[in-house]
């Protein structure tokens, strides 16, 4: 409840700041035809991923709510590569956008590009995956430790308090490291006899299948797998299926896409921990817009407009059972068309 209240209050704050930024005086309005056009860019590390399509859909809707003079774009490499993503930020910056929102492939590689944008006067808001040591103005995302704890609880509820858990992640990706630690901390507190091992799948479905298969064959005590990102669960499910271990090994994923939804419905994945990418994209844009339009509200990062340094949303477990509800199926099975 406290997290939900925090998110609601943050949203109200953003809208109040945006309202101040767009007001020109009492009973005075400006036609959008008289307003200078503005460009805002979203940069992601796997362009084309359904998760980021959801986020970009939220950004587009937020831009429409401001006015037709706002243009948005989605940029970034198709493959998971932090260096290529940093280059995308540099390329976007050359267009002199009014603001950039970015989900970071890892926290360190993006620092120079983010700092360059800030130093040149372009506000940068991170979302989904942060770069906290950079000069970014704000982060919109999920408390990833809590996110991982949701997975930990699902695992303990299903397998009890013994065995071993394999955790799939990409080392260096701060959101995944936090999700992994959240799961580990939950297990340590509630099922200390459960051991864990870390698998690096490099953010690739095929690699996830390979490392999962090798881990299961080397360690028959593995009873559960938690993927800290969206590509791991489909790869792990393929490995478990090939080894005929469907009845023996529980799989908990992160996020959702068409492949994961089908695996949930088939029972090959027991659950996936989710946040709301649409809302993250929506709020990240609103913060970028507020930062680009200073108001009378005192800012902690002048000359940029005031934005809260952090907005957290909640997380929950999506299961095949939930998807039996037609309303839930409609919500999750229809990714946005870009």
Image: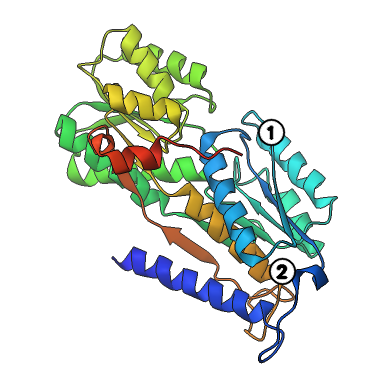
Taking depth in this image into account, of 269 and 190 the one nearest to the observer is: 269
Report the side of 37 relative to 74 (left or right): right
Count of picture labels: 2
x and y, in percent, of residue 137 in the image:
63, 64
Q: Is residue 205 above or below residue 141?
A: above
Q: Is residue 260 above or below residue 152?
A: above
Residue at the farthest left position: 160
x and y, in percent, of residue 243 in the image:
31, 7
The image's mark for residue 269 is: none
x and y, in percent, of residue 253 in the image:
37, 33
The image's mark for residue 77 is: 1
Instruction: State the residue at coordinates (77%, 40%).
Output: 87
| SS for dot 2 | helix
Report the side of 256 relative to 323 (left or right): right
Label 2–label 1 contact, CB within 8 A: no
x and y, in percent, of residue 104 in the image:
61, 45
Instruction: State the residue at coordinates (36%, 25%).
Output: 262
Quadrant (top left, top right, bottom left, bottom right) of the C terminus: top right
Instruction: State the residue at coordinates (27%, 8%).
Output: 244
Kindly tell me whether residue 303 is visible in this rendering: yes
Res 186 quadrant in image: top left
Between the C-alphas of marks 2 and 1, the distance is 26 Å
Q: Which residue is mark 2?
A: 292
| SS for dot 1 | loop
Res 38 quadrant in image: bottom right
Around disc 2, counting alpha carbons within 10 Å, would you say few (fewer than 14), some (14 to 19), or many (20 or more)?
many
Around disc 1, counting alpha carbons within 10 Å, would you say few (fewer than 14), some (14 to 19), or many (20 or more)?
some
Taking depth in this image into account, of 25 and 154 the one nearest to the observer is: 25
Kindly tell me whether residue 139 is visible in this rendering: no
Taking depth in this image into account, of 53 and 148 the one nearest to the observer is: 53
Q: Earlier in the sequence, mark 2 or mark 1?
A: 1
Instruction: State the residue at coordinates (55%, 78%).
Output: 16
């Amino acid at each position: 409840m406290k997290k939900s209240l925090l998110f609601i209050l943050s949203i109200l704050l953003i809208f109040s700041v945006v309202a101040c930024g767009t007001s020109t005086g009492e009973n005075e309005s400006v036609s959008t035809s008289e307003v200078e056009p503005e460009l805002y860019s979203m940069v992601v590390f796997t362009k084309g991923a359904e998760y980021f399509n959801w986020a970009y859909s939220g950004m587009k809707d937020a831009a429409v709510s401001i006015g037709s003079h706002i243009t948005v774009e989605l940029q970034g490499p198709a493959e998971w590569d932090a260096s290529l993503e940093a280059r995308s930020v540099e390329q976007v910056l050359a267009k002199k956008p009014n603001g950039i929102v970015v989900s970071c492939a890892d926290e360190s590689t993006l620092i120079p590009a983010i700092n360059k944008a800030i130093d040149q006067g372009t506000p940068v808001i991170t979302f989904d995956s942060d770069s906290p040591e950079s000069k970014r103005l704000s982060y919109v995302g999920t408390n990833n430790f809590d996110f991982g704890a949701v997975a930990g609880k699902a695992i303990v509820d299903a397998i009890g308090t013994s065995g071993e858990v394999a955790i799939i992640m990409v080392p260096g990706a701060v959101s995944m490291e936090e999700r992994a630690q959240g799961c580990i901390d939950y297990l340590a507190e509630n099922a200390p006899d459960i051991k864990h091992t870390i698998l690096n799948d490099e953010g690739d479905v095929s690699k996830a299948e390979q490392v999962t298969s090798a881990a299961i064959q080397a360690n028959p005590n593995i009873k559960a797998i938690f993927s800290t990102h969206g590509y791991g669960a489909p790869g792990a499910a393929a490995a478990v299926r090939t080894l005929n271990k469907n009845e023996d090994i529980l799989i908990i994923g992160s996020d959702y896409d068409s492949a994961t939804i089908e695996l949930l419905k088939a029972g090959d994945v027991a659950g996936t921990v989710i946040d709301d990418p649409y809302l993250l994209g929506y709020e990240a844009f609103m913060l970028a817009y507020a930062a680009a339009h200073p108001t009378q509200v005192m800012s902690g990062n002048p000359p940029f407009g005031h934005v809260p340094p952090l907005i957290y949303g909640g997380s929950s477990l999506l299961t095949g059972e939930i998807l039996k509800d037609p309303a839930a199926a409609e919500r999750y099975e229809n990714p946005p068309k870009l």
